[in-house]
Amino acid sequence: MVDRQMTQARQQRRRVILAAAAGLFAACGYRAAGMEEIACRAGISKPVLYKSFSSKLELYLAVLHEAMQELEETLTAALEPAESMRSIVEASVAAVFDFADIRPRSAALLAGAAVADEPSAQRIAHRAATICIETLARALAPHPLPRAEHGWLITAELVAIAQSCARDWVATGKPLPKHEAVATTASLCWTGLAGVQLAPQPPVRPVPDATA
């Protein structure tokens, strides 16, 4: 009973620390954030903080992992009911906007990690982008494109467009209602995808007979 209570207390303390650290890292970035300030925000002493996380980097990476998991869960849940190719594109864009809108701290953390002067953080940001691409690629798998060898590039570009538009929408103060911003971005993505899908294959020219 006592062991269970101690485990629950440690888990609760970890959640409090991660929440405090996420807020500071998102606001200040990795380099500017300090462990003393994180401890203060978490309502614990600095030595207690170091009992949970041995370094600021370890804490930062734990925060980024949580943000990455939230992104994956948001995208997976949005794509689950989508079946047609267009509904998959629309659901993907909506999920990216929802993540930027509803979980702005996690979105800011991953965006900051991509440009952080810390290779391990950059790897997590890259992994987060890869997860988005792979999740969308799996959803689109029942709808193979005629140019299958370009599938990864096309999927990556769809994700990049959605993320860029969502970031700009938030950064500019959300000038459009979210549903309009999502619809506009989804239409842009779908138009581009349809153009690729319908692009005619160039005719294969016969190779001249060298013996003729």
Image (cartoon, grey):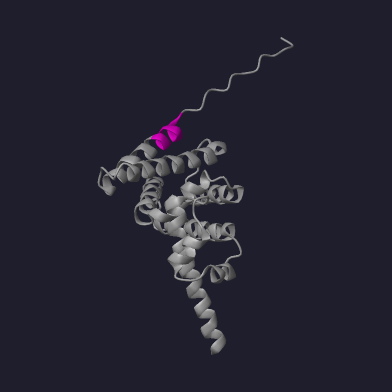
Q: Nearer the viewer, residue 33 or 5?
A: 33
Who's the residue at 50% across and 79% down the image?
A: 9
| Farthest residue, direction right | 211
- In the picture shown, does residue 42 fall above or below 157? below
Q: Quadrant of the C terminus?
A: top right
Picture layout, residue 158 above or below residue 139: above
Q: Quadrant of residue 186?
A: top left
- Looking at the rendering, in which quadrant would you find the N terminus? bottom right
Residue depicted at x 38% and y 39%: 190
Residue at figure coordinates x 57%, y 86% from the top left: 3
Q: Is residue 154 above or below residue 118?
A: above
Foreground pick, 112 / 92: 112
Q: Is residue 137 visible?
A: no
Magenta stretch: dominant SS?
helix
| Residue 84 included in the magenta stretch of the image | no
Residue 47: where, in percent of width, then height?
56, 70
**Which residue is more in the foreground, 140 or 46?**
46
- Look at the image and give the residue range highlighted in magenta: 192-199
196 is within the stretch colored magenta: yes
Residue reaching furthest bottom? 1
User: x, y percentage for residue 54?
Assistant: 61, 64
Where is residue 102 drawn, in percent x and y?
35, 56
Q: x, y percentage for residue 138?
A: 51, 51
Among the 4 quarters of the image, the one containing residue 168: top left
Q: Is residue 92 visible from the viewing direction of this image?
A: yes
Q: Is residue 101 left or right of residue 113?
A: left
